[in-house]
Image (spheres, coloured by chain):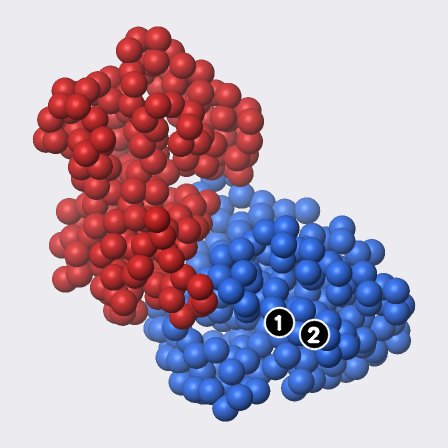
Chain colours: A red, B blue
Amino acid sequence: MKVIGILGGMGPQATIDLYQKILDSTAARKDQEHIPTLIWSNPGIPDRNLAILHGGPDPSSALREGAIILEAGGADFIVVPCNTAHLFADAIREAVKIPLLNMVEETAARAADRLPPGSPVSILATTATVATGLYQKALEKHGLSFMLPDSGDQEIIMAAIFDERGIKAGFVDDHNRTRVLAVVRRQQELGAVAFIAGCTELPLVIRPDDAECMLDPTLLLAQAAVRLAGAKPRM
Amino acid sequence: MKVIGILGGMGPQATIDLYQKILDSTAARKDQEHIPTLIWSNPGIPDRNLAILHGGPDPSSALREGAIILEAGGADFIVVPCNTAHLFADAIREAVKIPLLNMVEETAARAADRLPPGSPVSILATTATVATGLYQKALEKHGLSFMLPDSGDQEIIMAAIFDERGIKAGFVDDHNRTRVLAVVRRQQELGAVAFIAGCTELPLVIRPDDAECMLDPTLLLAQAAVRLAGAKPRM
C-alpha cells in the first residue's frame, strides 16, 4: 500500500475527521490491513482567510515546509483537509515531487457523477474560498452551475466556523449545527438541491442526510485516498 | 510550543483516540492555539502480542524506523498510543535523541496520586502486557498492588480486542463494551475498586464512569503530552 500524507491542522479537528473517514472507508479486519499514514498537523499555519481577505501572513511557506516533511517521511501523495488551503495548492505542488490529491477537484468530479448537467450546487464555504471562486470554477469545469448564500448568510457561515462559540473554538454542537442548517434551508427555498460542505469544519456539524445531496469533500477525499493508496475499500 | 510526535497505528483508531484527547485537553479558541503534532500511523507494525507470546515477527525495527521519522520531521518528544508496544520502549529510546513520554509510567504515577498506598488495581490489558508484568512492575514501583482477570476473563478481553467481531476489526460497539464490562463487574465482585484500561483499544468501548476509578492511559498520556508541549491545558 502507498503511504498517505496528510497536511493538516487547519483545523486539527478536521484532520481527525479526515483520518476517521479514511479508516471508515477501508475494509480492514486488523491493524495491518489499514493504510500507513503520515500526518503533519500544524495548527500554527497562518489563517488562510486572513491572508486572502485582509493581507494577513502568507501560509505558503508553512504549507511548503509541511509538504516537504511529509515527502521526506515517506508519503507517496499528499491530501490537505482544508478547502481554503487549496488556494495555495500551487505552492504545495512546487515544493515536492509527490502528487497532491486535490479535494476541490475530487468533490466537483463526484458532484458531476451524481447530478444532471447544469444542476445548481450551493457552496457553503469560507469567504476566502467563495471570493476566489475556488469551487465555482471547479463546478463549471464539470458542467455544473452554482449558488451562493447572500452576504448575511455568508456571515452566518463564517461566524459558525470562526467566532468565539464557533467550530474552530471546539464547539462541535447544536448551536453551530443550527446556524449552518438555517442557511441550508434558505438555500433550499431558493432552489438548491445539492450542497457542498466546502469548509472542513462544516461536516463536523452537518450530516449527509441534511439535504437530498449533501456533498462532504472530506469524505470524498478520504474515499479517493483509499483508492489511490491501494487498500480494499469498505462498501 | 513543542511538537508532539505520535508513533501510532497500533491500532489506528487508538491513535485517533489519543489525538482527540490531546485536542480536548488543550484550551484553544482557534487553530493556532493547538499543539503542532506529527503522527506516524503505521498499522503495518508487526503484532506485538504475536511477537511476545508466539515468536511472531519482531516489531522493534518498525518502531525504531518510526521514531526516526518523527525525530527527523521535527518532533520534540514521542508518545506511543499502544500499551503493549511499551515492551519495546528501549528500542525506541535507543533509536532517537528525543525523549519518550512513557504511558505506562505516567498511568502508574497518576494512579498513585488518586489511590491510597497498597490499593489493588485491576489490570485490563493484552495477554502480552499482562504476561510480561508491564503494569504490575509500574504499579508496585508506585506503592500500589494489582489484580488480574482469571484466564477465562483474560480470553474474553483478548477476544473483545482481536477477534473477528473485535475492536481492532472496527467494531467499537455495545457487543464489545458488554464483553469488557462483564470482566470489570467480576473484578469488582472480587474487590477491585480501580481499573487500568491498559490496552488502547479498551477506552474506545468503556467510559470513565464505568467504575469508581477507571484509569484511561490514553487520556493520562494526552494530558501529560499537553503539559510537556507547553500548551494551555483545558480544565
Subunit that carries the residue with mark 2 = B
Q: In this picture, is A36 found above or below A171?
A: below
Residue B116 bears which disc, if any?
none
User: Residue B158 bears which disc, if any?
Assistant: 1
Above or below: residue A159 compared with residue B49: above
In this orientation, which residue lies closer to the viewer: B190 or B110? B190
Instruction: Tell me what residue is drawn at x 50 percent, y 26 percent.
Output: A176
Image point (31%, 38%), residue name = A217
Q: Are marks 1 and 2 in contact (CB under 8 Å)?
A: yes
Q: Residue furthest bottom?
A: B55
Identify the residue under disc 2: B154
**Label 1 neighbourhood size at 10 Å, few (<14), some (14-19), many (20+)?**
some
Indicate the quadrant where residue B163 lies: bottom right
* Residue type (three-letter) at the residue carrying disc 2: Gln
Instruction: Where is residue B181? Give x, y as percent.
Output: 73, 58
Q: Is residue B212 visible?
A: yes
Distance from disc 1 to disc 2, alpha carbons, whole Å, reads 6 Å
